[in-house]
């Protein structure tokens, strides 16, 4: 039997999709990457995952693990023809909420929004939020070490994973399903698999940390004159409501314009436009915390010295959702505008103003008139620095790599990262090789070889190593 | 020139201590491990650290990095004669506090208490606290992935390190000194070096995350009838003051007895004795949070249903210190009692009561009358489960390994860890090999080999691999 037949017989009709029917899994979210697979394996148990990896390893067929396939860096599709896509989406079991311990056990295929829903009303929450949460799955979120809008308070995925179960490239299972924060019994494997983008092993289950859901919440949308004011408002919020702040997001008038123009049913909830907007959210777990009063005071102070030109506090869940929607439609507004370049950078948050100024000069010097739409996470300094061509033009004249390299260099120089939360995937490996210290690259190559000697698991992602053939 | 002469000439008089004068560095904190070194290297720059490692690698002399030498697992001394102790204590520069960004850059040799002191009055704090903070150094805390009393709120060392500078076994320097939370530019090296106990590289500098210091703080000492009550009080605190809770510590009457008996100037601040005591600390960053009122309410409720039999809220800094001292003298009280066995275990916090019951049966079945002194961190389930011999006896009749193995197994079974926050060092490697899954051991061995091919850096710690000789 050839590999396809073996996999088909192992996984059954639901579990093996041949090449001809693989369209729904083949290409990445942005439709930039993804070659024709031998087929899509959809195991429903860890034993099946292990068997798939074993069979593929025996004949050295590459395997790429896939969750919700929402990677913005092409991390979950094939870089060359003929490998197997390993979809974890059927491993979507959500375990009982452990209320007393504040943990939950979930399968890799659990969609983030489903987990949130499951926890509704339990008094606990899983605090990770990203735009793609309606599709993104836990395994992929772990692989990408997802961050999102609430990370500066609650942490990234790596901070929220207590235990992991991982199938290694040869099919061996590592059972690291502990349910404690403190575990120093050797190297921090659970941290290492977070952000490894499925290149070291395939995550099948996880124990996640849950937190008390806030009892009182406040969400404000503010218009601010410039980025310096945004940073000062953020500093005021930190000083007066530091531990309650759960989101500090920003977007620009450029992005707002595109979103209002391109998304028909979107409306802007404030009366005044300005160059930047920030969305502040805070939550408290104790009913004795006057969270609204704290925010009224902060906002009054900010208004009175001109740091805020207009603003509103959400008075209903519907209004809160409207505020968030304006922020979250930023990428979609720009996508509908036509061709674009996405960059996912971070700098120390207080340097965001400097960064935007310097990055803008760089970009204008590369291509005069290029439209800059920075938005993202003021709380942690992660900016999605996305570009649209100058008005009236359709493309970037082959300058894509120049933009990426010079913006990445700038982030590096400022103590930040050229790949903040989306990871490297296969989209940014060549860029990374220009931007990372060769020592860092070498350590990553050694890590990859240590876990996946033959280089069969998601080859070409994070770091390119030569695939070693069987002797 | 031989290695000693080369090192002496490289490092100068202050920088190289010959074997004869190495007594202050040679043995571990508990005086159980540590063989005679060739000498102690005390570099004062990263260039010197690199040169030391290069010279030692060339002649395959093992190197063990050492900070404050407070390891409770023998992680920072030599396992066999003739290696070099690499003391980082002269690399003790504390950089400027970056107030706006909430970060600070520190050398590996900075003593934790000195960092705390430096931050006093800045409005920011570094939230890690351990008993040994007057001696423990940042590099060692990173190597051990230290946890301590405030970890369940603020995280362990791995959660507080943003950037790292590490010298690799061959003297190469990895510069990972970024200053951002979000950095997914490849494998999470910064997380991996946390907890690697100096076996993969030598940490020389770090960028640490700082947090706003609380404006209002409350510390309570409570006597509770049993562990079930302690757990219920903890649950009440979580429900009503969850986000303000910064420490939830416990100790037993057995330990209190030993401490009061053996430490002359120690006094007990409550009127009533009971079987367990808990220390609760909470802090809020906003002056509008009625933190004391919240606690009065919690305690009133707990008193009224018999969960607390006596208690006090600290009314002064002196009183707060007295409460903490009672907790922190628990290890010293037992040490002065004579021979003891230390175990550093964790279980999901809500299972601590079950654990104590089952562990006590195990221990009594191994050695009738053995005195059990459990204390530690109710907030995260980390219990220092320390034993003294039965009254009138001096030792453990060779049962040391039996205790360690059976307690470790129990912690494993309950979803916890047999090495929670002190690490494996060289004290627990053999135990680990009995308790860890061979798959986990193999992954750790591969990691070790990937970073330290010849096995010259802190050999015998975390995982034993054969040292490979030069060809």
Image (cartoon, coloured by chain):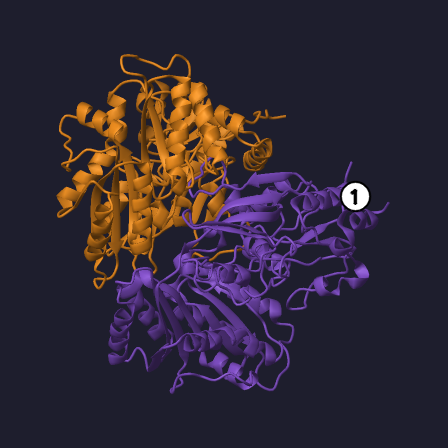
Chain colours: A purple, B orange
Position of residue A261 relative to residue A178, above or below, is below
A325 left or right, relative to A23 = left
The residue depicted at 47 percent of the width and 77 percent of the height is A326
Question: Which quadrant does the N terminus of chain A fall into?
Answer: top right
Question: Which quadrant does the C terminus of chain A fall into?
Answer: top right
Position of residue A305 relative to residue B391, above or below, is below
B293 left or right, relative to A208 = left
Using the rendered image of the protein, determine whether residue B458 is visible from the camera's viewpoint.
no
> Where residue A227 sits in the image (x, y, percent)?
38, 74
Of residue B425 and residue B306, the one placed in the foreground of this image is B306
Please, which chain is the residue tagged with disc 1 on? A
B294 left or right, relative to B146 = left
> Where residue A204 sits in the image (x, y, percent)?
61, 48
- The count of marks equals 1
Q: Quadrant of residue A232?
A: bottom left
The residue depicted at 57 percent of the width and 82 percent of the height is A390
Mark 1 surroundings: few (<14), some (14-19) or many (≥20) residues within 10 A: few
> Where residue A357 sits in the image (x, y, percent)?
43, 73
A250 left or right, relative to A84 = left
Secondary structure, mark 1, is loop
The residue pinned by badge 1 equals: A59
Q: Quadrant of residue A248?
A: bottom left
> Where residue A319 sits in the image (x, y, percent)?
42, 78
Of residue A289 and residue B235, the one placed in the foreground of this image is B235
Q: Quadrant of residue A269?
A: bottom left
Using the rendered image of the protein, determine whether residue A88 is visible from the camera's viewpoint.
yes
Q: In the displayed orientation, state which residue is furthest to the right.
A: A1
Of residue A276 and residue B386, the one placed in the foreground of this image is B386
Q: In the displayed orientation, state which residue is furthest to the front.
A: B305
């Amino acid at each position: 039997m050839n590999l396809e037949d073996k996999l088909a017989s192992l996984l059954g009709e639901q579990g093996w999709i041949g090449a001809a029917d693989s369209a729904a899994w083949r290409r990445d979210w942005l439709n930039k990457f993804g070659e024709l697979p031998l087929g899509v394996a959809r195991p429903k148990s860890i034993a099946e995952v292990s068997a798939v990896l074993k069979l593929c390893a025996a004949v050295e067929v590459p395997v790429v693990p896939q969750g919700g396939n929402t990677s913005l860096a092409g991390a979950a599709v094939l870089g060359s023809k003929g490998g197997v896509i390993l979809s974890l989406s059927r491993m979507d079991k959500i375990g009982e909420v452990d209320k007393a311990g504040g943990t939950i056990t979930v399968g890799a295929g659990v969609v983030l929004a489903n987990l949130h829903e499951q926890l509704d009303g339990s008094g606990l929450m899983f605090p990770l939020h990203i735009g793609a949460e309606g599709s993104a799955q836990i395994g992929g979120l772990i692989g990408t070490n997802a961050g999102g809008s609430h990370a500066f308070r609650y942490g990234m995925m790596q901070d929220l994973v207590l235990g992991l179960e991982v199938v290694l490239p040869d099919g061996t299972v590592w059972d690291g399903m502990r349910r404690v924060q403190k575990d120093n019994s050797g190297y921090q494997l659970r941290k290492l698999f977070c952000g490894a983008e499925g290149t070291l092993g395939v995550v099948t289950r996880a124990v996640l940390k849950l937190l008390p859901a806030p009892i009182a919440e406040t969400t404000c949308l503010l218009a601010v004159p410039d980025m310096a004011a945004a940073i000062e408002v953020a500093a005021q919020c930190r000083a007066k409501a530091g531990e309650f702040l759960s989101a500090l997001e920003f977007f620009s008038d450029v992005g707002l314009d595109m979103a209002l123009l391109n998304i028909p049913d979107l409306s802007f909830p404030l009366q005044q436009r300005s160059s930047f907007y920030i969305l502040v959210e805070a939550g408290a777990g104790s009913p004795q915390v006057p969270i609204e009063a704290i925010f009224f005071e902060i906002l009054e102070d900010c208004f009175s010295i001109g740091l805020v030109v207009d603003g509103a506090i959400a008075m209903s869940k519907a209004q809160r959702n409207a505020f968030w929607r304006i922020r979250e439609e930023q990428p979609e507004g720009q996508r509908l505008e036509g061709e674009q370049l996405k960059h996912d950078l971070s700098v120390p948050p207080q340097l965001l103003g400097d960064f935007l100024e310097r990055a803008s000069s760089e970009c204008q010097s590369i291509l005069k008139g290029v439209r800059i739409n920075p938005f993202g996470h003021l709380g942690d300094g992660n900016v999605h620095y996305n570009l649209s061509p100058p008005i009236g033009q359709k493309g970037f004249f082959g300058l894509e790599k120049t933009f990426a390299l010079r913006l990445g260099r700038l982030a590096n120089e400022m103590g930040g990262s050229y790949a903040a939360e989306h990871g490297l995937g296969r989209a940014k490996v060549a860029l990374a090789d220009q931007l990372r210290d060769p020592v860092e690259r070498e350590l990553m190559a050694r890590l990859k070889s240590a876990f996946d000697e033959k280089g069969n698991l998601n080859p070409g992602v994070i770091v390119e190593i030569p695939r070693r053939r069987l002797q």
